[in-house]
Amino acid sequence: MTLYKTLNRRMVTSSDNGTVPASERFSGGKRVIDLTPFFGDGSALETSKSVRAPAGQWSMTVVDEMVVEHMDSLYGLVEPMDVIEIRMRHRPDPAATGMDPPVVMRGFVCDVGRTLSMGANGAPARAVTLSGMDYGKVLEMIQIRYLPNYVIGQNLLTVLNLFVNYGVEAKPNQPGNDFVKQIVDKVINPFLYDIAGFSVSPDTCKLSYLQQIEHEATASAGTISAFGAQAAQGTLWDVLRGLLDVGPWTELFIEDRPEVMDDPKRHGGVVLVYRDNPFKDLDPARGYIMPGATKIDALTVADDSVVALNVGRSDANVANYFQVNMPRMSLIDGATMSLAGQQRNPDAFYLTKHPNATPTLYGLRFMEADTQMGGADSLGRVDGQSAAAVKEGQRKDQLWIDQRRAQLMAMNKDNVVFESGTITLRGQATLRPGMYLRIQHGPSDAALRPFVWESYVVAVQHRMVPYQGFVTVATFERGTMFAEHIRRGAGLDSAYLAEWNQGGALG
């Protein structure tokens, strides 16, 4: 664990009456602090990340030991917005070999605390607690607000603010992937450059130890209405999430990757990922459901790495009647918008024949979602244009609604079979949210018919306690353990026997 000082503090505070300077001991010391030596008995480190949250979290408790060069505690040296890089490794992990342990998280300090206590035996205990967020914090720090005098001269809702302030294009039908790239290049990274200006650290990591954010926007072709984007307000994360169909159809999250990826075409470091939900069909032959889904990273572990497993399935998320709305059409004709969500063919919105969602067994289960995007050939906002343009725009939007509804049905028709849960593994530093995790039960010899199932990991927690252990807790969805169980036969094919055929420490 390494901490990089961001703020070159020369004073405690300043005012019209003068300044209160900081000591040379504080301001003149080294700007890079290795936190690893401060881990000892009673220390702990935990990180957590999710593809469903704007930012990951981290926290650590370290020994309150003096930093010799500064002659002070860590508590007196670390400040909010200092940069941290966390690396972990479990010694037997073959994917973690090399000079440096894999990067688990890069981010910022948010909170600094100190505890002093006396134990029951009279021994004193002192600790420093640090916590913070990953680079997703930047997406929450950047605020877009339209309030009087929030920024002088920008309190009119008619101003195309993203275009005026950042040069983000104001096209009526801008591709979503291009919009993400422009936000990263023209909004997020310039914000990071400004933060880097406070640092005096040598520029050895692009931005004085700050990482500029790369982008990987691979979602299927879809467009946003720039007129909606220019008037959006809130945190940058809220704006992006609201405009890019994040949730029902796409994902948007910050990923901490190795500096160099195996695929040279993919960015390493800190990456803002925008992609289609990488959900697979229950039939392995069909592969990914969404048309723009790309092959994502996967990790396979043997059952001897499993510390605990909590898995289950339920009919709570069964859906068989689907409705997709397109709110931006309501400015044209609310009735047209409602009718666009309906079809004369019931099979286009009502799963009456699919056994895993049949209303005969599960009753009517309604699922509704809003799409803020349009198709690749969308005309954007057509209100106020000629009758022919309005009619053509309605036709294209109806086709987009049909496409989105079909995708929503395909992703949710087998919810009663897919599993969700948590799995605790012996430390897997290379496991990241947004990956597929495969669990192999039994020997890897194909002749012995090992039992393998997989799941999509949506959140990962790494927990390390010195002298006790390092474990990884993964929260997963769309698990296929049950599906693989009922596909397997008896005898050598038995999934149950394969699960019990564990080698372990003595096998």
Image (cartoon, grey):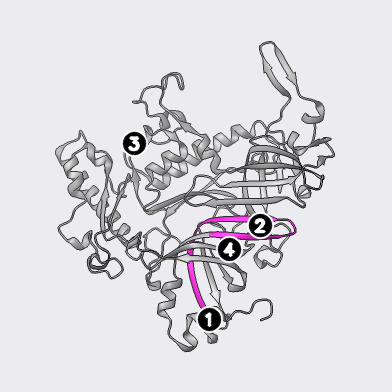
Q: How many marks?
A: 4
**Residue type at numbered disc 4:** Thr
Which of the 4 image quadrants contains residue 277?
A: bottom left
The picture quadrant where one finds residue 465 is bottom right
Verify whether residue 388 appears in magenta.
Answer: no
State how far apart marks 2 and 1 are (Cα).
32 Å
Q: Name the residue under label 1.
A: 498
Q: Which mark is residue 102?
A: 2
Q: Residues within 10 Å of mark 2 (few under 14, many from 20)?
A: many
Between 274 and 82, the residue placed more toward the observer is 82
> Label 2 vs label 3: CA separation?
41 Å
Q: Which residue is drawn at 54% across and 49% down?
A: 271
Q: Alpha carbon of mark 4 to alpha carbon of mark 2: how far?
A: 19 Å
Q: Is mark 4 on a helix, strand or loop?
A: strand
Instruction: Write the start and end of the magenta stretch as one range.
Output: 450-474
Q: What is the C-alpha distance between the residues marked 3 and 4?
A: 43 Å
Please report whichever mark, 1 or 3, sits nearer to the chain's N-terminal start: 3
